[in-house]
Image (cartoon, rainbow, N blue to C red):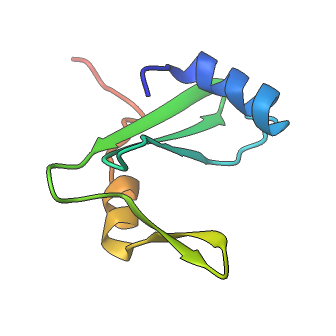
């Protein structure tokens, strides 16, 4: 979770064989499920969003169903990540 956008993009290319410049949003979660990073590439720039939850809150629940890992995201946690403000422009006067 210490990686920045260029290193995360390299992980997407090498480990998952995907193109991080294709407009998709990629979500990475820490082992303890308290920190989540979302990255996407748009208009020649990387956008990296990070959210850290306090004690007692987790981003996803992991369950086993028929010996298959199932990841469940509570709606409020997904909305909390997606509501991270992104500065598109800044006017200095």
For the C terminus, the image quarter is top left
In front of the other: 10 or 60: 60
* Pick the front one: 12 or 79: 12
To which quarter of the image does residue 20 belong?
Answer: top right
Identify the residue at horizontal 40%, vertical 31% (top origin): 89
Q: Residue furthest left?
A: 55
**Count of marks overlaid on the render:** 0
Q: Residue furthest front?
A: 67
Quarter of the image containing the N terminus? top left
In this picture, residue 5 sits left or right of residue 43: left
Q: Nearer the viewer, residue 25 or 10?
A: 10
Question: Where is residue 76, by image quadrant?
Answer: bottom left
Residue 11, position as x, y percentages in the image: 69, 27
Q: Is residue 21 visible?
A: no
Q: Give the residue displayed 71% in from the left and 21% down from the top.
A: 10
- Residue pictured at 30% horizontal, 25% vertical: 91
Q: Nearer the viewer, residue 68 or 6?
A: 68
Q: Position of residue 14 (x, y in %)?
A: 80, 26
User: Residue 85 is drawn in which quadrant?
Assistant: top left
Left or right: where 76 falls relative to 68: left
Q: Residue at x 64, y 34 (%)?
A: 41
**Up-down relation of residue 30 to residue 66 (above or below):** above
Left or right: 40 as drawn, with respect to 20: left
Residue at the extreme bottom: 66
Q: Position of residue 60 (x, y in %)?
A: 41, 62
Q: Position of residue 42 (x, y in %)?
A: 64, 35
Query: In this orientation, does residue 88 appear?
Result: yes
């Amino acid at each position: 979770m210490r990686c920045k956008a260029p290193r995360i993009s390299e992980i997407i290319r090498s480990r998952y064989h995907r193109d991080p410049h294709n407009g998709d949003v990629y979500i990475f979660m820490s082992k303890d499920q308290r920190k989540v990073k979302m990255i996407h590439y748009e208009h020649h720039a990387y956008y990296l969003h990070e959210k850290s939850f306090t004690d007692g809150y987790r981003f996803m629940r992991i369950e086993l169903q028929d010996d298959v890992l199932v990841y469940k995201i509570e709606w409020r946690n997904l909305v909390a990540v997606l509501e991270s403000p992104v500065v598109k422009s800044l006017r200095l006067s």
